[in-house]
Amino acid sequence: MICKTCGYPVPDGMSRCANCGGEDLAEEKLSLKDLLTAENLEMIAAVIGAVPVALMAASGIMGIFCEIKFIGLFFRIIRALIQILVTLCAAGTAGYVGFLMYREREMTKPGGIAAMAAAVFALLSCIGILADVGFLKALCVLSLICTLEMIPRVIINKKGLGGNIDLAADIAVYQSYFKAARQAQTDEQLRQANMAQRSDTSYFDGKGFECLGYTLAASILSCVTFGIAFPWMWCRLRRWMYSHTVINGRRLTFTGTGGQLIGLWIKWFLLTIVTFGIYSLFVYVDMYKWETKHLFFEDEHPVNGQVNTGSVFDGNTLQFVGTELLCGLLIVFTLGIGTPWAVAMMEKWKMRHTVISGLKLDFDGTGLQFLWQCIVIFCLTLVTFGIYSSWGIVRMNKWIFGHTFAAAGRSYD
């Protein structure tokens, strides 16, 4: 930020200018010229080789929706636009790297040649994806290999695109990074353990095995009863989740029962049918409103089935659909990279409309904080053929509720 009074730069997190003491601050406006610096362009060139793989995955996922009647055409248009945009970006990157090779002698060394190869392979791969040409798609493997070499050299060590290649140094960088990531995970576990001993913090202490067991039981019983048992299984899962959730040092409890929910579930199901699916947009908000009415703090000693008049969700369907659409576009147009930011956006909206026993909740998590968690969840779920998904849910809940709190000075009247 910059100070409106004196124009002095103010570091993020500070609410007062260190130069003049003023509080009249403004966000510093960045132009396209400020973003397209040589350093930023080099970073783009260093990771461009990974883009075709992400584009191929995103195109495959969107291909599922392209086969759906009525909305399939919309998704085909969006997919084509994304493919064209990414291909143009790859072409621009290849042109920039080629210009550097022409102008700078350093770029004629192995590092520069690898950068040019990554850009060319990435461009050809993107063209192959756009035109559905198999042998061109396969070049994404070569572009990815070049990118894996450039990430530690260009992005982490800041040595630039040109120069010589040192594979031993690159491997050492990766080893150091993963060691630091493991240490960060250990530190996070210690932080969670310390939080559990404090009286003013928020956290989630559920286990992956518990989540897996409840999920399997709910799925099996719902299937064998043709969906009749779903309201009871859903309430059981919610009771487990909230019994392991602590907000500002106070543990939650959920009092809703399947017997209370089944009537509403039948009503929502019938309304969805008679409105040709339109009412399905309202079900999530209606469900969460009912769920919130049955949330208490454990120290309030509620009984099973009791409704809490001090707990309410005041968000509406229009807000939900708008936020969900914005999150979906963020995920699609960033080829999935924006998922952590989309999750943070949705949780911020949901928590800021949630009140428990008269206390408004708030959420201060950011997408950047959740990025590493998303990478771990995605990779481990993929290599375990989905088995890790229950542990992924627990990991996500730990992050979400670890950043959820009852906002000081905010109560619901």
Image (cartoon, grey):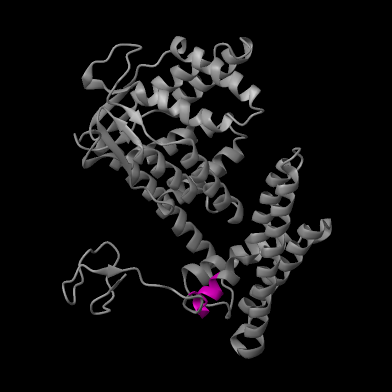
Residue at 45 percent across and 58 percent down: it is 177
Q: Is residue 408 above or below residue 5?
A: above
**Picture coordinates of residue 45 (x, y %)?**
60, 71
**Picture coordinates of residue 289 (x, y %)?**
41, 27
The mark total stands at: 0
| Chief SS of the magenta region | helix
Of residues 98 and 345, the one nearer the viewer is: 345
**Picture coordinates of residue 125 (x, y %)?**
75, 62
Magenta stretch, residue numbers: 35-43
Where residue 113 sits, quadrant-wise, is bottom right
Q: Is residue 120 above or below residue 71?
A: below
Q: Is residue 220 left or right of residue 366?
A: right
Q: Is residue 96 left or right of residue 26?
A: right
**Picture coordinates of residue 202 (x, y %)?**
28, 36
Q: Quadrant of the N terminus?
A: bottom left
Residue at 73 percent across and 45 percent down: it is 63
Question: Residue 36 colored magenta?
Answer: yes
Of residues 46 and 112, the one nearer the viewer is: 46
Farthest-out residue, front: 275
Q: Inspect this view and state whether residue 167 appears.
A: no
Q: Quadrant of the C terminus?
A: top left
Q: Is residue 371 above or below residue 400?
A: below
Question: Residue 44 colored magenta?
Answer: no
Residue at 26 percent across and 27 percent down: it is 357
Q: Inspect this view and state whether residue 373 appears.
A: yes
